[in-house]
Amino acid sequence: MKSKANNKLLEKQEEFIENVDYYFENSLMVLTAHFLLKRGFCCRNNCRNCPYTIDTDKNLQQKSF
């Protein structure tokens, strides 16, 4: 029997689409800005395609394209 927490986690999982959500570069998976925007927050790991900027007050803002 699966716990309720595991069921909720499975419900939230989505299928990743290659060349839309990610791509491979030198055998490493790189997340796209599309995926990172869809995720909805910055992880502050300096992702290559991060669509967010951090201003001097440490507030996150979406980059304007």
Image: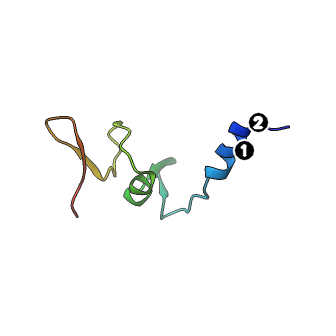
Residue type indicated by callout 1: Asn
- Image-quadrant location for residue 6: top right
Look at 23% across and 64% down and name the residue there.
65
Look at 57% across and 58% down and name the residue there.
16
Farthest residue toward the right? 1
SS at mark 1 in the image = helix
Q: Nearer the viewer, residue 22 or 40?
A: 40
Farthest residue toward the left? 56
Q: Nearer the viewer, residue 59 or 45?
A: 59
Decide: few, some or many residues near mark 2? Use Cα within 10 Å; few <14, some 14-19, many ≥20: few
Q: Which residue is mark 2?
A: 3
Look at 28% across and 49% down and name the residue there.
52
- Residue 13's spot in the image, x, y percent? 62, 51
- Residue 7's spot in the image, x, y percent? 72, 44
Look at 66% across and 51% down and name the residue there.
11
Position of residue 14 relative to residue 9, above or below, is: below
Q: CA distance from mark 1 to mark 2?
A: 6 Å
Residue type indicated by callout 2: Ser
Decide: few, some or many residues near mark 1? Use Cα within 10 Å; few <14, some 14-19, many ≥20: few
Q: Which mark is residue 41?
A: none
Is 19 left or right of 65, judged from the image as shown? right
Is 7 left or right of 65, judged from the image as shown? right
Camera sees residue 19: yes
- Residue 47's spot in the image, x, y percent? 35, 44
Q: Nearer the viewer, residue 2 or 24?
A: 2
Position of residue 31 relative to residue 6, above or below, is: below
Q: Which residue is mark 1?
A: 7
Q: Are marks 1 and 2 in contact (CB under 8 Å)?
A: yes
- Residue 41's spot in the image, x, y percent? 38, 46
